[in-house]
């Protein structure tokens, strides 16, 4: 459960992210720097025998989990050959959205074709569709569902178990952090867009590498903390600065953050010298709304910066963290 001073946190905007999902992403064609070299892949041999290959591209699938038929979108890049273990990005939508909409809004599938990784974008449950971060009895156990989904994909596809990552938007960002605490060691790094929230009771002492993005004019999940009031979502959140400090403390980082201006309207807050080579990095979007940086603008969510591409930055962070993790394990 996510809480602050006894108040339940529900990050996201009902319906608003649905609009964001229907828009095609405006992607930049080049990264803001060269990607680090890929880590040495590790996977189960049985899933990497080069047998019958699935269709490349996008597909809609169903998994029976927790007594329910749960759905998800899967993107398999053209470069998948069933023998070379590929990274996997778990891509979580926001409140009221869907996996397919999040895939389109974030643009991860397009980048996956360029960088050769798998993307799974599952659907939450309920009406509006959401991730059960409050552990409501009326909604399914989404932590268990994600665990079963990852297990099923790793049995079927040639996945590098040591390059599995999770990214989320708003309600999905809060859930991504919950997953990192509930499944210690399952994800190399986490990306949180518009909801950096340290869980009140994180079930692991293992450090968690975190990259986050948040607009200072986000009216759904306030940058300076306070009530979440957009759509049907209710609750309260701490400030982004406080959440970053909490994650830095969890990771054993230096208590002093480094601060830098990246562009005219984008600055970073970064904590380093963390346990196991992890890091906490926050991109502050000055004037930004409840939006995914670099994506197609959705007016009702506020301003969308094009000065930084969150998807590109997230991927670079993921790969760098995987390389550091692999180096530390050797």
Image (cartoon, helix red, strand yellow):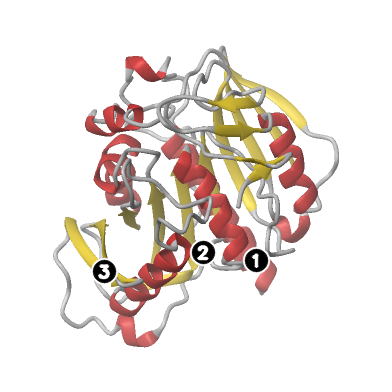
Residue 272 in sight here: no
Q: Is residue 119 left or right of residue 307?
A: left
Is 6 rendered above or below residue 20? below
Residue 87 in sight here: yes
Element under label 2? loop
Task: State the residue lying farthest toward the front.
Answer: 138
Element under label 1? helix
Q: Is residue 97 left or right of residue 284?
A: left
Question: Badges 2 and 3: C-beta atoms under 8 Å apart?
Answer: no
Question: Badges 1 and 3: C-beta atoms under 8 Å apart?
Answer: no
Question: Badges 1 and 2: C-beta atoms under 8 Å apart?
Answer: no
Is 329 rendered above or below residue 20? below
List x then y, in percent, for residue 276: 73, 61
Q: Is residue 31 left or right of residue 134?
A: left
The image quadrant that residue 266 belongs to is top right
N-term mark: 1 or 3: 3
Q: Which residue position is annotated with label 1?
A: 327
What is the C-alpha distance between the residues marked 1 and 3?
35 Å
Q: Which residue position is annotated with label 2?
A: 39
Give the class, few, some or many, for how many residues have Cα within 10 Å of label 3's Cα (few <14, many ≥20): some
Quadrant showing the C terminus: bottom right
Q: Which residue position is annotated with label 3?
A: 63
Nearer to us of marks 2 and 3 is: 3
């Amino acid at each position: 459960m996510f809480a602050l001073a006894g108040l339940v946190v529900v990050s996201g905007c009902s319906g608003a992210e649905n609009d964001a999902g229907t828009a095609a992403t405006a992607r930049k064609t080049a990264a803001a720097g060269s990607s680090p070299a890929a880590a040495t892949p590790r996977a189960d041999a049985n899933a990497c025998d080069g047998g019958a290959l699935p269709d490349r591209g996008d597909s809609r699938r169903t998994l029976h989990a927790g007594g329910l038929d749960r759905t998800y979108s899967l993107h398999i890049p053209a470069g998948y050959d069933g023998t070379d273990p590929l990274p996997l990005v778990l891509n979580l939508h926001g409140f009221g959205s869907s996996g397919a909409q999040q895939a389109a809004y974030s643009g991860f599938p397009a980048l996956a074709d360029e960088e050769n990784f798998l993307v799974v974008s599952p659907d939450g449950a309920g009406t509006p569709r959401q991730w059960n971060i409050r552990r409501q009895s009326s909604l399914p156990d989404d932590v268990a569902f994600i665990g079963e989904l990852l297990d099923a994909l790793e049995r079927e596809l040639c996945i590098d178990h040591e390059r599995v990552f999770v990214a989320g938007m708003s309600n999905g960002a809060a859930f991504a952090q919950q997953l990192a605490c509930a499944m210690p060691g399952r994800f190399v790094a986490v990306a949180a867009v518009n909801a950096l929230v340290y869980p009140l009771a994180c079930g692991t002492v293992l450090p968690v590498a975190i990259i986050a993005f948040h607009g200072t004019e986000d009216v759904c999940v306030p940058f300076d903390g306070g009530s979440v009031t957009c759509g049907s979502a209710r609750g309260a959140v701490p400030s982004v600065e406080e959440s970053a400090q909490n994650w830095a403390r969890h990771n054993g980082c230096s208590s002093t953050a480094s601060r830098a201006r990246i562009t005219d309207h984008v600055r970073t807050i970064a904590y380093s010298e963390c346990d196991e080579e992890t890091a906490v990095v926050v991109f502050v979007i000055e004037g930004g709304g409840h939006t995914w940086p670099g994506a197609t603008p959705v007016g009702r969510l506020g301003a969308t910066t094009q000065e930084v591409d969150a998807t590109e930055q997230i991927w670079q962070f993921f790969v760098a963290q995987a390389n550091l993790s692999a180096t530390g394990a050797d």
